[in-house]
Each structure stands twice: as structure tokens, then as C-alpha cells.
Image (cartoon, rainbow, N blue to C red):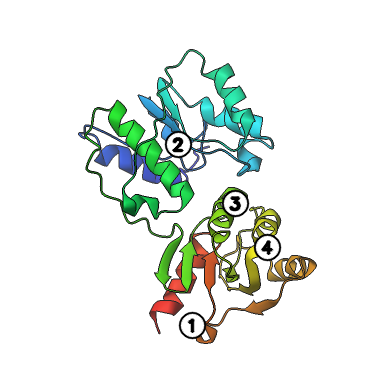
Amino acid sequence: MIEKLTYFEYTTLIGLYLSNNLEFLVLEAGLGGEFDATNVVVNDLTVITTIDLDHQSFLGDTIEKIASTKLRSCDNAFIISSQINNEVYEVKNLLLKDKKEIELKKYPLSVESNNLPQYLQNNLQVALSVLEYLKIDCNNYIIPKLFGRFQKIADNITIDVGHNPLAAKAIAQELKKSDKKVILIYNSYKDKDYKEVLRILQPFIKEIQIIQCDDKRMLNTKELECFIKSLCLNIKYFDIMNIRRDNHYLVFGSFIVVENFLKEFNSL
């Protein structure tokens, strides 16, 4: 029996072919870990980003199992970003004791960088540490425009393609800085921990507007409605014509949610 490549395996293969003659190759693990398609490449440097519960059906149902699956993909040197679960460091000390750990440094950030959300500042510090290790000049870096990562597309509208509790925690940190509650425009894939996401964001939500997404992977809207009601939050269905300047909106819940919102927003 011949098995077909998955979409991610296919695009990884194409990416490897097209980058054959490059000096540096950066591969982002999709699902993450030793069973990821990108793990066919022996890596010189592994960047371990913040690990939390996600993709449990594939990676494991505890932080220790997920961290183990991800860290076993490290072949040589590694750098580890700031973590919110101490279990990650315990697994790192166990599995990577024979690997070379690169120091995560704290660089003075530009004024522009200091305006980034904290989690993006943390990511920037990791990137600068990697550049220094590779002996690439990082003194005159330019902040890239990251689409969909706590991005303001209007004075009162922020979009974010995060879809798990870790992303929700990062957003909650930013929302704490303001005394304004947001209207959350939301939907979720059925395999995501939407209950924990909404519990984390609940203190900052004025109302939830469910945006329709035509995809069989999406959660049943009746199930989503039922849980939102259990949090005693107001529910409406999203209508672009009801966007008001005196409300603040957060569009959150994966790429498909943001994409559907932007289609309607850009058609105005």
C-alpha cells in the first residue's frame, strides 16, 4: 500500500528542494517534535520556543511528554526560550545533557521593539541570540511586520491568529495593560482547547461574537454557544455592519477566523 504525503510533508519536500543551494536554512516545525516532517534534516541549531499543552493527541497529554517529543528532535546545539512550565527544563536537563546549549542573552531593544507585545519581545531576544551564535551582525536589525500577531489593523481592531491557551495567555498579558474590555470575534477548531482559551480571556471580554467559518474541522456552533453561556458572557453572531468605533475588537482563533474577518472588513 502506497501512502500519500500529507500537505505539510509535501510542502516541506518542495521547500528543501528549492533551498538546496542556500547558506542558511530555517525550518519551522509544523506539529513539532521528532515525528515532524522537518525532522528529516539534521539540524545544526535547534530553537526551542515556549512549550505548553497543544496537539495532545499527537505529542502527548502532559508537558513532560510534549517536551520530550519536541526536544528529541535536537541533533546538535540548541537554544531555549523562556518557558512557563518548569517541566520543560527538567526534560531538557535529562534529554539534552550531551548537547551544546547556547546562552539566551538579553539585548537592549530599540524603542520600536519595546512597543511590541511582551511575547514578541521574548521571541526577538531569541532571534538575536541565534544571529550572534551564527556570527551574523544583529546590531542594526529591523523589526519585521508580523501579520496576525497581535496586529492592530485599526485603532479599535486587533487581529491574532493564535488558537491555543498559550496564545491566549500572551494576549491576556497585553489586555491587562488596558482598562477597556473587548468584543471577541471568535471561533475554534474542534480539536483545540477552546474552553481553556475562553476561560483565560473571560476577564477581558465584554461580548463574544461567533464568526461563521465554513470548514468541517470547526467546532459545532451550538456547543460553542453552550459553553459561552456557562461563562455568563453575551453572545451574538458576527456581522461586519455592526462594527462600531466606540467598541474595541479582538479577532482571535486561528488563520481561518482572521481570514474570514478580513474578507468582510476589506470589502467595506
Count neighbours of disc 1 (C-alpha within 10 A) and say few if under 14, some if 14 to 19, many if 20 or more. Answer: few
Q: The C terminus lies in which quarter of the figure?
A: bottom left
What residue is disc 3 on?
169
Query: Which residue of the protein is positioned furthest toward the top in this rendering?
Result: 98
Q: Amino acid at mark 2?
A: Ala
What residue is disc 1 on?
245
Dot placed on the residue nearer the N-terminal end, 3 or 1: 3
Dot placed on the residue nearer the N-terminal end, 2 or 4: 2
Mark 2 → mark 1, Cα distance in angstroms: 45 Å
Q: Quadrant of residue 218?
A: bottom right
**Residue 217 in the image: x percent, y percent?**
60, 60
Dot placed on the residue nearer the N-terminal end, 2 or 3: 2
The reply to whether the C-beta atoms of the residues labelled 4 and 3 are less than 8 Å apart is no
**Residue 130 in the image: x percent, y percent?**
34, 32
Mark 4 → mark 3, Cα distance in angstroms: 12 Å
Mark nearest the camera among 2 and 4 is 4
Dot placed on the residue nearer the N-terminal end, 1 or 4: 4
**Residue 18 in the image: x percent, y percent?**
25, 41
The reply to whether the C-beta atoms of the residues labelled 3 and 1 are less than 8 Å apart is no
Report the disc number at residue 37: 2
Mark 2 → mark 4, Cα distance in angstroms: 39 Å
Q: Amino acid at mark 3?
A: Lys
Q: Is residue 96 above or below residue 124?
A: above
